[in-house]
Amino acid sequence: MSLVARNKIDVRILLADDKVASVEILPRVRPPLAGVFAGKEPSTVLNVLPRLFALCVAAQQTALLSAIETARDEVITRATRQQRIALIVTERIADLARSLFVGHLTLDVASAAAIRSLMSELSAFVRSAQPAWSSAQREATARIVAAMAALGLHEGEALRSDSPLALRVAALNDVDVKSISAGHSFLSVADDPNITKRLLGDDSTFCYCPDVDGHVPETGPWARQVSRDRVPLGPFGAAERLMARINEVLRLCAWLKAGAQIGAAEHGIIERYKLGPRRAAAAVECARGRLYHAVELDAQGRISRFEFLAPTEWNFHRRGPLVRNLQGAVLTARRREDAVHAVITSLDPCVAFTLNVREVRDA
């Protein structure tokens, strides 16, 4: 069974004298998982989950499993938590690295070969994940770091000016639409209490059209960097988001190379929340942003209610980051589609979308 075929967003841009007058987003049709999961044994749902989601599968499984365990009042061991964090980090590196290839280096043959080598090493690492950090995993991490170096990515160093990614950053700066930071907010673990208590609440529209106290924050690598570094923001756009992805890949590789210790892990990467008797939620930081799952179990331990909130619902909200980036921007005829495309893919390189840019013409 697959429910991803209709997972597409329609973006419609209306221009007046080359200035964006309006941005309309027709959201994707979310898979009807609440009805699919109702009455099912949790083990059955967990087994079928990889067939329902094409992206961030480990994060989806971890979020649901963590919510179920918390609803059952189960306590996991430190070793299990370490294994899950390492798995999420590995998947994030793989997905972020893949987005560099698909979104930015598709036509670079040398980079494609290096990316394929990196993907192969990461896939092998995920398959060999063990509860305890082993010498084999350290060796696999060393190969991952070497594959990153082949792409010109070195921890603590700036991109080589002649490297394909550095040239891509420069190209994005040339065509980019910069957003004024004052109008933006960024999702973080601090927002979890507000969000998780609403996941199983009475507002049936929340998981389709979420907000945090009326605001629609951005989520993903750039949001994580802003929340972590807490530095003053200037105008930003696709180039800055690309650099955030690159920096995150390097930072996560360094964490793996250092032994994947829980104490040095990213704050809030996997969080669990008890919401009441047999009710709980979990949040996981996946490559695309912060992911939430919530469950309610019946007296027999079966799933009676399930809700999920994906990064897509924040970044492509009708009042969200994409709209804020584009509203009022000046797009010349030469750069229109390129600029809009750059903003969309900077928020999520994996999102499926259609784009329609047209001008208002005076009568």
Image (tube, rainbow, N blue to C red):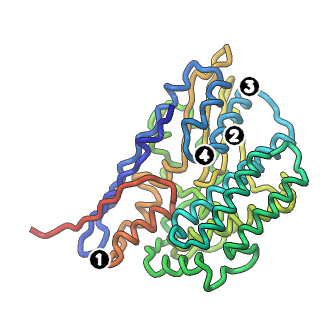
Q: Secondary structure at mark 3?
A: loop
Q: Secondary structure at mark 4?
A: strand
x, y percentage for residue 4? 47, 41
Which circle marks residue 62 in the picture?
Answer: 2
Cα distance between the residues tagged 3 and 2: 15 Å
x, y percentage for residue 221? 61, 61
Kind of residue sitting beneath label 4: Leu
Q: Residue furthest top?
A: 300
According to the picture, the residue beneath numbered tag 4 turns out to be 291
Cα distance between the residues tagged 2 and 4: 10 Å
According to the picture, the residue beneath numbered tag 1 turns out to be 333
Which circle marks residue 7 in the picture?
Answer: none
Which circle marks residue 72 in the picture?
Answer: 3
Q: Nearer the viewer, mark 3 or mark 2?
A: 2
Kind of residue sitting beneath label 3: Arg
Kind of residue sitting beneath label 2: Thr
Instruction: Please give the name of the residue rendered at 58% of the width and 21% of the height, measured from the top-left corner.
Output: 304
Q: Tag 4 or tag 3, which sits nearer the N-term?
A: 3
